[in-house]
Amino acid sequence: MEEQKTVALIAHDGKKQAMLDFVREHRQVLERYELVATHTTGKLLRDDLGMKVQLMLSGPIGGDAQIAAQVAEGRIEAVFFFIDPLTAQPHDPDINTLLRICNVHEVPIATNPATALFVISARAL
């Protein structure tokens, strides 16, 4: 039996509504995967949409690093990380680590809804 693939979902505070909207619109596709998310994003997905999501720490206290580690271990198929490019983040080093690890391991990382839609539409997952 093939192991179910995992998708990570992360959104900066200014992009959480965009993530909720994206997941709501593409729920049928995303429900085929194990979902992992940073704490605040995942809790919103659970509470607002009733999604089954494994919660990591909040991004600023290590959640991005936890997801980066899972990418490096080959446990994550794709990352949807809706970044707010207009707001400085105190945990930029962790964000850059996640971006670098995804590039090193050739894991798709969508930093906005348009790219995430492309990844889903291309059936890359």
Image (cartoon, rainbow, N blue to C red):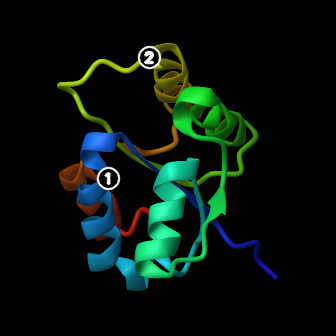
Residue at 50 percent across and 51 percent down: it is 40
Q: Secondary structure at mark 1?
A: helix
Mark 2 lies on residue: 90
Q: Is residue 95 above or below residue 83?
A: above
Alpha carbon separation for disc pair 2 and 1:
17 Å
Numbered circles on residues, count: 2
Amino acid at pointer 2: Pro
Local crowd at mark 2 within 10 Å, few (<14), some, or many (≥20)? few
Residue at 51 percent across and 14 percent down: it is 93
Q: Position of residue 21 (x, y in %)?
A: 25, 68
Residue 94 can be seen, yes or no: yes
Q: Is residue 76 above or below residue 89?
A: below
Q: Is residue 18 above or below residue 59?
A: below
Q: Is residue 44 left or right of residue 6?
A: left
Q: Please report whichever mark, 2 or 1, sits nearer to the chain's N-terminal start.
A: 1
Q: Secondary structure at mark 2?
A: loop
Q: Quadrant of the N terminus?
A: bottom right
Mark 1 lies on residue: 16
Residue at 54 percent across and 80 percent down: it is 32
Q: Position of residue 52 (x, y in %)?
A: 60, 76
Q: Is residue 97 above or below residue 10?
A: above
Q: Is residue 15 left or right of residue 114?
A: right
| Residue extending furthest toward the right | 1
| Residue extending furthest toward the front | 47
